[in-house]
Image: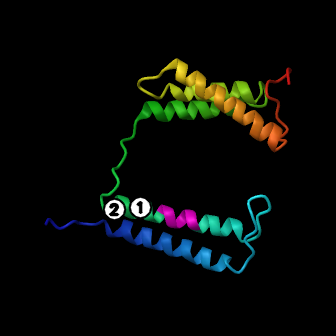
Amino acid sequence: MPRQSFNRAEVFAAAGLAAFGLAVIALATDYPLGGLRRPGPGFFPILTGTVLVALALGVLAEVRGLATRPVFRLRPFLAVSLGIAGFALTVERAGLVPATIILVLVSGLGEERTSLLSLAGVALFLSVLGVLLFIEGLGMPLSAIRGVL
């Protein structure tokens, strides 16, 4: 069996990240956790510590060769970045629904094979979900379509 070589710096970084995450969790256990509707003072630190430990495990998986290193592609990066920028620039001016449609359609251009029908379905679903969740459910001061609703 061939001997695997490890990048020791990445292993130590992952171990340090995991140790820090576990320390955050251990320190936060003295505080009340609360619930999802009314989180207590220990909720966010425990959640953060758990995410840090999960990230450390991801780094270790990559070091061991269990995860494949993704190839950087410029087209999806630019499409998603422009989609987010388009959303940010239009959500207050045009409303949540048009901004979501812009986000989905522009970000969808990053795919090599894009189906306009599937992008339209995703845009419709996310628009309805956004209105129901953020405007109706959470009462955020957004309009669905500026000037209409």
| Among the 4 quarters of the image, the one containing residue 103 | top right
Instruction: Give the SS element for disc 1.
Output: helix
Tell whether position 6 is magenta.
no
Work out which residue is located at the far top of the displayed protein and give it.
Answer: 116
Q: Give the range drawn in magenta.
A: 50-55
User: Taking 28 as reference, is 146 left or right?
Assistant: right
Q: Mark 1 points at which residue?
A: 59
User: Mark on residue 139?
Assistant: none
Residue 138 pos. (x, y %): 81, 44
Three-letter amino acid code at the position of disc 1:
Val
Q: What residue do we see at 80% from left, 62% from top?
A: 38
Secondary structure predominantly adopted by residues drawn in magenta: helix
* Lateral position of residue 100 relative to residue 137, left or right: left
Q: Residues within 10 Å of mark 1 (few under 14, many from 20)?
A: many
Measured as percent of width and height from the top left, residue 83 is found at: 59, 30
Image quarter where the N terminus lies is bottom left
Q: Which residue is drawn at 58% across and 30% down?
A: 82
Q: Do the residues labelled 1 and 2 touch (CB within 8 Å)?
A: yes
Quarter of the figure with residue 130 = top right
